[in-house]
Image: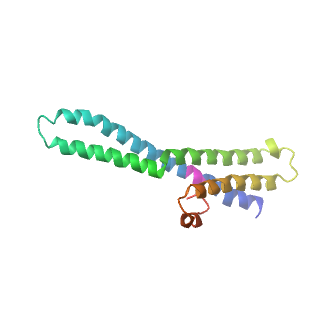
Amino acid sequence: MEEKEYLEQRLNDQLKWYGEKSKIYKKRFYCFRIATIVLGASIPVLTGFVSLWLGWLRVIAIVGALIAVMEGLNSLWQSQENWIRYRIIAENLKHEKYMYLTKTGIYRNATDGFADLVERVETIISSENINWANLQPNEKTNKGANNHGE
């Protein structure tokens, strides 16, 4: 694979993928967290209406159940952890790209800077894939690991 092709088809593709995934997990985390806070804060208010009408007990129960479900989903999806992990990977890939393009850091006096770039980028990506595979609960899931750690 040539340098231009690698930069466009591999590195930029990975940068885009990790950046987009980071944004998705960040939005998911914040949406669920804000909803949980708002619903949690509404329980004392709703409790005040119990004396007016016993039907509010059902509403309070539903709100409590929604909080539990949202927290469970946030935990299951690991939204905050994935958001941060993907952002770190995207920033590491960006760092390598800019250091390479500006011929600074390890690329300053490199005899084959492109080979160094490919090795470093692929190490970052494969480390993420290995980490993802290690977090999976069984071997069947590990066999299905794709190129992006999902």
Task: Please indicate whether residue 42 sits to the left or right of residue 11 in the image.
Answer: left
Count of numbered marks = 0
Q: How is the image coloured?
A: rainbow
Residue 32: percent from left, percent from top: 40, 45
Q: Does the magenta portion include 99?
A: no
At horizontal 29% and vertical 43% (from top left) the residue drawn is 64
The answer to which of 120 and 100 lies nearer the viewer is 120
Q: Quadrant of residue 54?
A: top left
Q: Does the magenta portion include 17?
A: yes
At horizontal 32% and vertical 37% (from top left) the residue drawn is 40
Task: Please indicate whether residue 40 sits to the left or right of residue 97 in the image.
Answer: left
Q: Which residues are magenta?
A: 16-20
Residue 10: percent from left, percent from top: 67, 59
Q: Quadrant of residue 141?
A: bottom right
Residue 23: percent from left, percent from top: 51, 47
Which quadrant would the C terminus be assigned to in this image?
Answer: bottom right
- Residue 35 visible to an observer of this rendering: yes
Most extreme residue toward the front is 138
Q: Quadrant of residue 42?
A: top left
Residue 69 to residue 139: above or below:
above
Task: Please indicate whether residue 66 sits to the left or right of residue 52 in the image.
Answer: right
Task: Please indicate whether residue 123 sits to the left or right of residue 65 in the image.
Answer: right
Residue 39: percent from left, percent from top: 31, 40
Which quadrant would the N terminus be assigned to in this image?
Answer: bottom right
Most extreme residue toward the left is 52
- Residue 104 visible to an observer of this rendering: no
State the predominant SS element of the stretch in magenta.
helix
At horizontal 21% and vertical 36% (from top left) the residue drawn is 46
At horizontal 59% and vertical 67% (from top left) the residue drawn is 143
